[in-house]
Image (tube, rainbow, N blue to C red):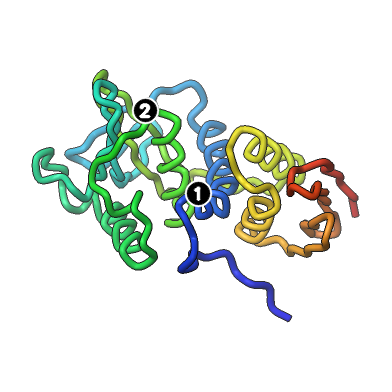
Amino acid sequence: MKEKAIEIEKSDSFQKIFTKYGAFALDKQESLFEVIGDNIGELDIDNGTISFGEELEFPIQIIGTLSNETSKWHWAWDNEEVGIPKNLVKEAEDVKKIGEKYDIGQFTTDIFDADLLESHIIAMTVSGIMNDDAYYAVDFDDIVFFVTIKSDKIPHVESIERFINTYDKFQKEFDVKGRLAFEGYTKLRGYQYKEREEFSVAKIGESRVIVGFTDRCNVNLIQTMLG
């Protein structure tokens, strides 16, 4: 029987979508920072790029901004006053269409209250559902620009240790349901997923990662069986 793919469903809230896609987005952030090191990104809106030093440059999409002064998130698809080039907001417009299709208010409301953490969660969610390779936040004093990146210069690391550490970090640091987060991360990484009443299993090659859950679906065990 074919496994059910990870996708957005009609009943999904924004938080549920984040739970499904967030761990994989976090994994890709780890890969980005391994590539860029300590370099700070410089945004070039005219050329639609972000650069990290002289030799590393990526094409970007601008998904939104956060005002540090007012603590407001502003989607880039609503950019008549800002004047962002249309070719740089295509992804943001696609996210809005997803929001309209699945009735996700966070994707269709042009401006709303958000702090820095909530803005990063929005960017992680977008990065996940749009299959980007990473996202990045560029701080211009009063305004933080959130951009997404697609580039084969950012590798997808195949590592059981990385998989476990990323999942554990995600389920501890964010308000998510651990089992659904594990299922989403496993399947989006292309690994086989099996579920039992008290635990779930990710098959990675010949090895297994087993995650146990309490009656309240909290994680109480992460164990590896190496093949």
- For the residues labelled 1 and 2, the Cα–Cα distance comes to 28 Å
Rendered location of residue 126, percent (x, y):
41, 50
Image quarter of the N terminus: bottom right
Is disc 2 surrounded by few (<14), some (14 to 19) or many (20+) residues within 10 Å?
some
Placement of 73 over or under 41, stated as above or below: below
Q: What label sits on residue 172 in the rendered view?
A: none
Q: Where is residue 53 in the image (x, y as percent from the top left)?
A: 38, 25
- Identify which amino acid the numbered label 2 is placed on: Gly
Left or right: 44, with 220 as reference point: left
The reply to whether the C-beta atoms of the residues labelled 1 and 2 are less than 8 Å apart is no
Give residue 147's position: percent from left, percent from top: 34, 40
Local SS, label 2: loop
Q: Pick whichever of labels 1 and 2 is earlier in the sequence.
A: 1
Return the residue nearer the eye: 14 or 146: 14
**On screen, residue 31 above or below 191:** above
The nearer-to-camera label among 1 and 2 is 1
118 displayed left or right of 35:
left
Q: Find residue 111 and report its image quarter.
A: top left
Q: What element carries label 1?
A: helix
Q: Mark 1 points at which residue?
A: 15
